[in-house]
Image (cartoon, rainbow, N blue to C red):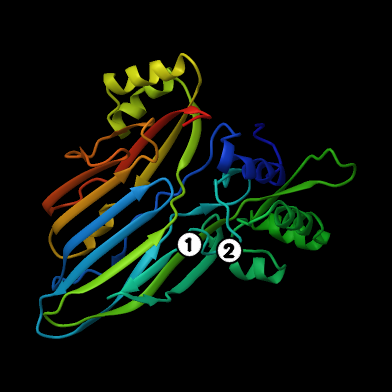
Amino acid sequence: MSARMSWAAAFATLAAVACAHANDSTAKLDAGGLALTYNPAIRMEEEDLYLSEREVRVRYRFLNTSNADIETLVAFPLPEIETGEGGNYAIESSDPINFIGFRVTVDGRPLTPSVQAKATSLGVDITSLLEKYGLPITTIVGTDRERAALNDKLTGLPEHALRELEKYGAIDRLSSSRAGVADVNPRWSAHIAFYWFQTFPSRRPIEVTHRYKPVPRNFFTGLEELGGARMRKDYCVDEPFLAAARKRADSATLTGLELRYILSTARNWAGPIGSFRLTLDKGSPARVASTCFSGLKQSGPTTFVAEKKDFMADEDLGVLLLWRTPNE
């Protein structure tokens, strides 16, 4: 894909990526767990994390150890979201804000969180500027028709609007094969956080769950990349993993997937996590996985489990999955 390819063409390609890995690489969003303002009285007694390519599910059990109820802000912030050429996320969603399908319950009852969504360019908030011209916070849309409509809306803006957006660094205009019409490439970033105010009752545990669809990086790969320094550092790639890769590379193209989860938000809670359980699902028995997370033991054809007591999340979690294209 050309580095100067228009964002509309990139999104048109993306529809095939999610199902058939038709692109060289897709972008990722390293989301994680819940965060809150630090309070030494609120302890995370349990965290049960299920991590797969298709879904992340987390169950927490919290205990307020003080003699008074505590109300505090709980948030689930997404990483910065790029638009345009950099935002080639493998996402199929008609919701440009809650495109990961984030859902939360408290003691078994569904809760509807508030949402903060804003756009920035070069660190400057341009949300009102986008609203002025009817542009969305993110360029994540569900169908080819919606993608084409958004592209037409951008390219069809009047000249004064395009100049103002350019002045803020929110867009650039690229050469186009269409005579007299320049392609418009979005350059802003989106920032989205789901949040609510939670009461933690004195001396009584509460259970909070959330789930969402992760946004991993999908890419074609080869033995040289898999054995490189970054893969060894980030995913502890070893010789058995590379041997499995060589075997698969003999007869097919290799597809890799980087699945990441930010564990470090747990440091906002008082002390270590009392009981931590991780279930990793690689999706197919034919796939191979590599991770630096210790203690995983196979529990099923595609699942691995690790359990830790008084767990302090010093590093975030990364998993590398590998399979032959297109059969696994």
**Real-space CA distance between mark 1 and mark 2, rounded to the nearest whole angstrom:** 9 Å
| Residue extending farthest bottom | 68
Q: Residue at x 27, y 76 (%)?
A: 107
Q: Which residue is mark 2?
A: 95
Q: Is residue 208 left or right of residue 99?
A: left
For this rendering, which residue is in front, 284 or 224?
Answer: 284
Mark 2 crowd level (few <14, some 14–19, many ≥20, 10 Å Cα): few
| Residue extending farthest top | 250
Location of residue 198 in the rendering, given as x and y in whole percent from the top left corner: 29, 78
Q: Tally the numbered discs.
A: 2
Location of residue 269 in the rendering, given as x and y in whole percent from the top left corner: 20, 64
For this rendering, which residue is in front, 2 or 102?
Answer: 102
Q: Which residue is mark 1?
A: 101
For this rendering, which residue is in front, 28 or 281?
Answer: 281
Location of residue 82 in the rendering, given as x and y in whole percent from the top left corner: 55, 51
For this rendering, which residue is in front, 183 or 201?
Answer: 201
As shown in the figure, which amino acid type bears the numbered disc 2?
Answer: Asp
Q: Residue at x 44, y 64 (%)?
A: 102
Q: Residue at x 39, y 76 (%)?
A: 111
Q: Quadrant of residue 238?
A: top left
Kindly state the secondary structure of the residue where label 2 is placed. Answer: loop
Residue 262 visible (yes or no) = no
- Whether the residues at callouts 1 and 2 have beta carbons within 8 Å, the answer is yes
Location of residue 314 in the rendering, given as x and y in whole percent from the top left corner: 20, 48
Q: Residue at x 51, y 64 (%)?
A: 98
